[in-house]
C-alpha cells in the first residue's frame, strides 16, 4: 500500500492554504491539530471534527482526517466523558487530524466559496465580504432569474434553500460567503450585492432583508461547506497517490 509522510502533507497544506498569513477566529487553530505515528496510507475528509466523524474515519481505515471545523473551538479540558472517548480513539487508531477554516473558505481554487461559485455556473469572480482585514467571499455581476438560482442551489445542495425575498426577481449582483454569515447581510448589501448566498442566519434577518432590498439564500451551514474539504482531499490524494473518502455527516443545519 502506498504511503506518504504526515509532515510532508501537513507542510504542503500549510503552504498551499497560506495558513500563516490568513487571520482567523480564536479557536480555529489551522494546521495539524493531532499527530499520528508519521505515515499516511489513506485520507478521509469531513466538514466537522467530532467523535462521530473520527469513528467514521477509523471505520474507513484512514490515518488522516481533514476537516473544515476542527477540534478546539472551545476549551478542551478536562478530558472526560465524550472528550476522553474522542482523544482515546485518535490515539488508539493512529489517526491524525488536519484542520483549515478561513484559509479553506477563501482559497481561489480549493475553497468553499470557489466550489459553490463554480457549481452555480457563475463566472468572473471578484473578491467580496471583508473579514479580519481580508476578503473571504466572492461576488459577480450577472443577470439570473431568482427562481433559476434557487433551483440551481437546490440541485447542488440537495435540498431547497430558504429564501428571504427582499430583493429583485432578476439577480444582478450575487455574493457568496459559505457557512454562517447570515448575521452580516448588512455588510453584504453595503458591498453592492442584491443577492447574498450563505449557509444560515438568525430570524431577525428576514425583516432586515426586506429593509435592505436584498435577496438572501440560506442553503445550510453544512451543505455550503462540503466543497473545500472535498477539493482538498481529492487534490492531496492525487498528489500523493493515496486513496481518499469524503465522510458525509450532515448536521441538518
Image: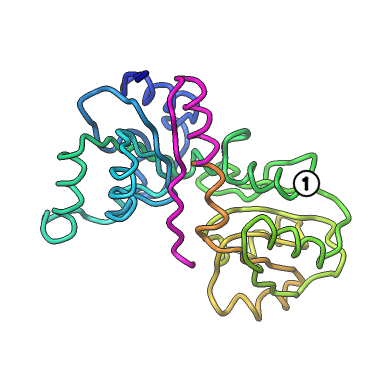
Residue 118 pos. (x, y %): 71, 43
**At numbered mark 1, what does the secondary structure look like: helix, strand or loop?**
loop
Q: Residue at x 89, y 55 (%)?
A: 143
Residue 237 pos. (x, y %): 47, 27
Q: Which residue is mark 1?
A: 121
Q: Which residues are magenta?
A: 230-253
Q: Specify whether residue 1 is painted magenta.
A: no
Residue 131 pos. (x, y %): 54, 49
Residue 38 pos. (x, y %): 24, 23
Q: Residues within 10 Å of mark 1 (few under 14, many from 20)?
A: few
Q: Residue at x 55, y 60 (%)?
A: 181
How many labels sit on residues? 1
Q: Is residue 200 above or below residue 136?
A: below
In the foreground, 208 or 216: 216
Among the 4 quarters of the image, the one containing residue 192: bottom right
In the foreground, 143 or 208: 143
- Horizontal arrangement in the rendering, residue 84 relative to residue 244 (left or right): left
Amino acid at each position: 500500500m502506498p504511503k506518504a509522510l504526515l509532515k510532508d502533507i501537513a507542510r504542503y497544506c500549510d503552504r498551499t492554504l497560506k495558513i500563516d498569513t490568513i487571520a482567523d477566529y480564536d479557536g480555529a487553530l489551522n494546521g495539524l491539530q493531532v499527530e499520528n505515528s508519521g505515515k499516511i496510507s489513506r485520507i478521509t475528509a469531513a466538514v466537522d471534527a467530532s467523535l462521530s466523524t473520527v469513528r467514521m474515519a477509523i471505520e474507513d481505515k484512514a490515518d488522516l482526517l481533514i476537516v473544515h471545523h476542527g477540534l478546539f473551538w472551545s476549551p478542551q479540558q478536562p478530558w472526560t466523558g465524550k472528550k476522553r472517548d474522542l482523544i482515546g480513539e485518535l490515539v488508539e487508531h493512529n489517526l491524525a487530524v488536519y484542520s483549515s477554516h478561513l484559509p479553506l473558505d477563501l482559497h481561489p481554487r480549493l475553497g468553499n466559496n470557489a466550489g459553490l461559485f463554480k457549481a452555480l455556473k457563475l463566472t468572473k469572480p471578484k473578491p467580496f465580504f471583508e473579514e479580519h482585514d481580508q476578503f473571504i467571499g466572492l461576488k459577480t455581476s450577472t443577470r439570473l432569474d431568482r427562481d433559476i438560482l434557487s433551483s440551481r442551489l437546490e440541485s447542488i445542495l440537495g435540498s431547497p434553500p430558504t429564501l428571504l425575498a427582499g430583493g429583485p426577481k432578476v439577480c444582478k449582483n450575487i455574493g457568496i460567503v459559505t457557512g454562517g454569515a447570515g448575521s452580516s447581510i448588512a455588510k453584504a448589501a453595503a458591498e453592492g450585492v442584491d443577492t447574498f448566498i450563505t449557509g444560515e442566519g438568525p430570524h431577525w434577518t428576514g425583516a432586515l432583508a426586506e429593509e435592505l432590498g436584498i435577496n438572501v439564500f440560506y442553503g445550510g451551514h453544512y451543505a455550503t461547506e462540503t466543497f473545500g474539504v472535498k477539493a482538498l482531499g481529492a487534490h492531496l490524494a492525487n498528489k500523493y497517490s493515496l486513496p481518499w473518502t469524503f465522510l458525509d455527516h450532515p448536521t441538518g443545519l
